[in-house]
Image (spheres, rainbow, N blue to C red):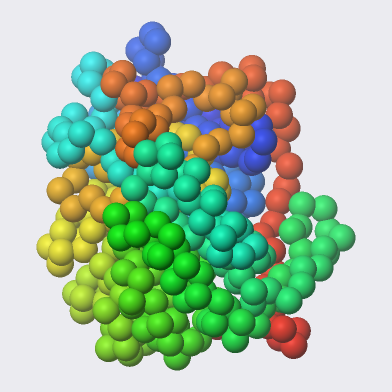
């Protein structure tokens, strides 16, 4: 079998997505992938088109060799754009391999290690009682893990720390969020005190800082949250601040998670080797696909680190399906972030993963289980988008 073509599909059914289709000379055999990257999809698309010249005519079964060929092809390698492009191709190759074998991808990764993947949803509100009510809606559906955030700016991470939002006037730009850390550090522990009293100890509670604190502020927050037994505190520090993790570890026993903007196994290594984190949050779509995330999971398992793959709305259903296949197969799974997609997307992508009684599952069909309706995708033209700008309350650009 030979690869005969690579299609890149940019579409916006509810929000922007980048999908990939790899064609072969075998009638009816093709693979689907995804390289969605939250506003940077046009750049990822050009990278895929550039890399595709190196795989036309190759045997799609040679996934490992193709991955390494593409990764090292440019000499200057790595980074989120390149990783997303590589993931889009890698997913499609695994999809083809599953279809040829007649098996879902998780069976090719060693088979099931569990019945399903525990998932967590996002509860939020302007004050603790509203967060509780939001969390109870998830619990009623069977969720045993809930991320709790007081509403603020992007992602609800700032709570009372957000002083204002200003639109930029630039098409597709979400404006500027202004953040003061003092109210956030006070209001967040109070919210979790309320949540524990209201929900008891049987529900696993999580929180995402979104990297908005200095190392000392992060240590204060982690210590103040100890009494409320979080399942983990996410992104208390940025990946660039790994040298401060010893201070954070010494300050608190609150479990720590990081990794949604990490793009390679080499960035993960010091976090594992020094026992600085408890959960790695990398997602297959952001590290080069299933081929690379498997390596990361093996490294993590060697240091007793569990996974908690990023799975927010800034990645799509094929990336989500790939994550679920890995979730089912690895021994050191922790939890999977889970969101619902825009209704329009269900006309474009079929065979998505599904939720039942607190767990998520991939389809049992060969490959990843997903497929693309290209004609439906054309109905939703891609819309350029940008992430918001973050500043401190005094207007300083938010660098740390």
**For residue 204, which quarter of the picture?**
bottom left
- Residue 223 sits above or below residue 7 on the image: below
Q: Position of residue 227 (x, y in %)?
A: 33, 76
Tell me if I can see residue 153 in this picture.
yes
- Nearest the camera: 256 or 317? 256
- Residue 130 sits above or below residue 251 on the image: above
- Nearest the camera: 390 or 84? 390
Q: Quadrant of the N terminus?
A: top left
Q: Position of residue 248 (x, y in %)?
A: 34, 85
Question: Which residue is painted at 56% across and 77% down in the image?
Answer: 187
Q: Position of residue 329 (x, y in %)?
A: 19, 40
Tell me if I can see residue 336 in this picture.
no
Question: Which residue is painted at 44% across and 81% down in the image?
Answer: 221
- Nearest the camera: 32 or 328? 328
Question: Which residue is painted at 16% across and 59% down in the image?
Answer: 301
Task: Give left or right: position of 90 versus 130.
Answer: left
């Amino acid at each position: 079998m030979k690869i005969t073509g690579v299609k890149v599909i940019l579409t916006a059914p509810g929000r922007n997505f980048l999908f990939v289709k790899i064609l072969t000379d075998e009638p009816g055999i093709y693979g689907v992938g995804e390289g969605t990257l939250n506003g940077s999809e046009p750049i990822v698309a050009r990278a895929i088109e550039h890399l595709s010249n190196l795989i036309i005519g190759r045997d799609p079964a040679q996934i490992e060799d193709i991955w390494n060929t593409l990764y090292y092809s440019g000499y200057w390698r790595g980074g989120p754009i390149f990783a997303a492009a590589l993931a889009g191709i890698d997913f499609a190759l695994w999809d083809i391999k599953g279809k040829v074998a007649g098996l879902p991808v998780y069976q090719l990764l060693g088979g099931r290690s569990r019945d399903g993947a525990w998932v967590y949803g996002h509860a939020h509100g302007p004050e603790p009682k509203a967060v509780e009510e939001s969390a109870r809606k998830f619990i009623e559906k069977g969720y045993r893990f809930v991320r709790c955030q007081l509403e603020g700016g992007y992602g609800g991470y700032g709570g009372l720390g957000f002083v204002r939002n200003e639109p930029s006037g630039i098409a597709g730009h979400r404006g500027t969020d202004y953040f003061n850390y003092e109210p956030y550090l006070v209001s967040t522990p109070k919210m979790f005190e309320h949540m524990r009293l209201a929900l008891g100890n049987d529900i696993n509670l999580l929180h995402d800082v979104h990297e908005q604190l200095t190392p000392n502020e992060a240590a204060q927050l982690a210590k103040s949250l100890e009494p409320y037994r979080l399942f983990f505190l996410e992104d208390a520090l940025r990946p660039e601040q790994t040298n401060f993790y010893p201070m954070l570890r010494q300050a608190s026993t609150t479990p720590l998670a990081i990794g949604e903007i990490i793009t390679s196994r080499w960035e993960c290594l010091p976090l594992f080797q020094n026992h600085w984190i408890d959960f790695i949050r990398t997602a297959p779509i952001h590290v080069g696909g299933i081929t690379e995330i498997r390596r990361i999971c093996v490294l993590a398992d060697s240091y007793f680190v569990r996974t908690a793959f990023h799975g927010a709305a800034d990645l799509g259903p094929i990336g989500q399906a790939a994550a679920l296949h890995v979730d089912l197969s690895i021994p050191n799974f922790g939890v999977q972030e889970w969101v619902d997609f825009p209704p329009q997307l269900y006309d474009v992508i079929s065979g998505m993963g599904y939720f039942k009684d607190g767990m998520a599952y991939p389809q049992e069909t060969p490959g990843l289980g997903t497929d693309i309706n290209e004609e439906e995708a054309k109905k939703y033209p891609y819309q350029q988008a940008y992430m918001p700008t973050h500043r401190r309350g005094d207007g300083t650009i938010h660098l740390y």
